[in-house]
Amino acid sequence: MARLKFLCDSDRCIECNACVTACKNEHEVPWGINRRRVVTINDGKPGERSISMACMHCTDAPCAAVCPVSCFYGTADALVLHDKDLCIGCGYCFYACPFGAPQYPRVGNSGGRGKMDKCTYCAGGPQQDNTPVEYMQYGSNRIAEEQAAALRRDVLDQGAARRRRRDHCRHLQGACSAARIRLRRLGLAHCLQARS
């Protein structure tokens, strides 16, 4: 089973926050939520590094272990996703996660919490793939989009292969017809009958 992971080269990260902006724009993340953020390690000291961080999709996810309604689930690609329809907004996952991935949008003037939001690894949610409901709750489902594109490419490749075979057969039929015509012109039509 393959495990999907993010890879960030800390030698090349310049703390521009383009990854944060791209994620927010692609998934229309609510104000005050950052599914991805840039963290600086050893700030102002020798060896200072910046790294882009999001949910680490842990093997034994602590957020899933403490959730009282079991809204977290794993996928075949070893991603840890959550169901916003089941989430009650208790905040246990926020305190359990060592990376601070689960976040809560502020709802109303009193600062009440809504449903938890976190990185989905661009895999959407439990709803049917690429539906408006899934997009509204979880943002783009890039994994399903890529799988659909790969399927379309396979179908197109199969169609192209069939066309190539058909064109090749037509070419061979045309070559055979041309050879018969040449043999008839040369008076060697009896060669064609002998072979048949």
Image (spheres, grey):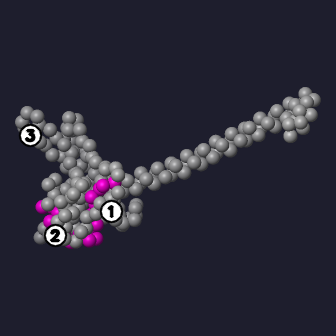
Q: Is residue 164 visible?
A: yes
Residue at 40 percent across and 62 percent down: it is 129
Q: Which mark is residue 125?
A: 1
Q: Which residue is mark 2?
A: 90
Q: Which element is circle 3 on?
A: loop
- Tell me residue 13's x, y (percent): 21, 38
Residue at 42 percent across and 51 percent down: it is 146
Asked if residue 170 lies left or right of residue 100, the reply is right
- Tell me residue 54's x, y (percent): 22, 51
Asked if residue 168 lies left or right of residue 183, the reply is left
| Marks 3 and 1 in Cβ contact (< 8 Å) | no
Amino acid bearing label 1: Gly
Residue at 21 percent across and 63 percent down: it is 64
Q: CA distance from mark 2 to mark 1?
A: 20 Å
Q: Is residue 140 visible?
A: no
Q: Nearer the viewer, residue 79 or 91?
A: 79
In the displayed structure, 129 sits above or below 186; it is below
Q: Answer few, some or many: residues within 10 Å of disc 1's Cα (few below 14, many 20 plus, some between 14 and 19).
A: many
Amino acid bearing label 3: Asn
Mark closest to the chain's N terminus, 3 or 1: 3
Q: Which element is circle 1 on?
A: loop
Main SS type for the magenta part?
Answer: loop
Mark closest to the chain's N terminus, 2 or 3: 3
Q: Nearer the viewer, residue 46 or 188?
A: 188
Q: Which residue is mark 3?
A: 42
Q: Which element is circle 2 on?
A: loop
Amino acid bearing label 2: Cys
Segment tinted magenta in the rendering: 77-95
Q: Does the segment drawn in magenta span residue 91? A: yes
Among the 4 quarters of the image, the one containing residue 61:
bottom left
Q: CA distance from mark 3 to mark 1?
A: 36 Å
Asked if residue 164 lies left or right of residue 150, the reply is right
